[in-house]
Amino acid sequence: MEHRRPEDPRSTAELIATSLRGEPDDDRVLEALHLLHWRGTRDVLEAAAQLLCSPVPRERGRGADILGQLGIPERTFPEECVRLLLELLLRETEPTVLESAATALGYFRDPRAVPVLVKLKAHPRAEVRFGVVQGLSDQESPEAVAALIELSDDPDENVRNWATFNLGTQLESDTPALREALVRRLSDSQEEIRGEALVGLARRKDPRVLEPLVAALHASNVLVLVVEAAELLEDPRLLPVLLELRERPGEADDYFRHVLDKVIRGYESPPLW
């Protein structure tokens, strides 16, 4: 499928200047970064590389943001991008820049990033540990999985949530240590994290998930994640609980009802093996 790159009359320098005038979630900044990513030319690569050498942390971080998705949807200069980001991580001390560089490396899924990222897993700043989680996304090596397991116990909710999501949903790895990490998160104080743990254990058909899953389906507030976990577990004992949930009075958004109906249909008409 051919992707048509968006056109914009502004120069690379102008787009970079715009990207530096706000926070990463600012609409103008996001638009400028998107255009730079899509442009993906060598002059964008070289301009981003220059930013990495700036004495200003915001500029170094923005250079990493540019390199992380350079050339999307078909990546350009991936080898140069990974090299530059790894070099930045090894010399950088500013937490916000470390987060940007670690997150950017996650888009490449390059195994060379794993040992560099793992060294930052116990960084005192939560934003850096969050970047490590993003950087290790989809990395299946034992070293990466072990780091994500450790980060799934992180005191920061956001770090813990994304680490649990990576372990439960993103990875194909299935080890006793990984399962035990997910079991620990079943008692997490945050319901979304509990939901991610339910999904991860249900994907792996771990029998320990049935009882907490039934309890979650009976809760006053049921997340879509919980219903998705019920679908993944494929245990017929869940059908009456799901039917009861559908008949429960109260408001539910259209998406939740759509997912619940789909899961119930799957249980009522199981595939023929």
Image (cartoon, rainbow, N blue to C red):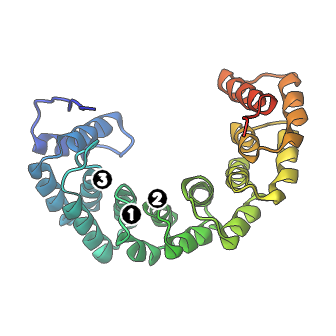
| Disc number for residue 134 | 2
Q: Position of residue 181 (x, y in %)?
A: 69, 67
Image quadrant of residue 178? bottom right
Query: Which residue position is annotated with label 1?
Result: 102
C-alpha separation, residue under disc 2 versus residue under disc 3? 13 Å
Query: How busy is the neighbourhood of tag 3: few (under 14 within 10 Å), some, or many (20 plus)?
Result: many
Q: Quadrant of residue 166?
A: bottom right
N-terminal label among 1 and 2: 1
* Along the viewing direction, whichever of 244 and 190 lies nearer the viewer: 244
In contact (CB < 8 Å): disc 3 and disc 1: no
Is residue 46 in sight in this rendering?
yes
Quadrant of the image containing the N terminus: top left
Q: Disc 1 vs disc 2: Cβ atoms closer than 8 Å?
A: yes
Q: Earlier in the sequence, mark 3 or mark 1?
A: 3
Taking the spot 10% from the left edge, 30% from the top edge, the residue there is: 9
Residue 258, x across and y down, in percent = 68, 24
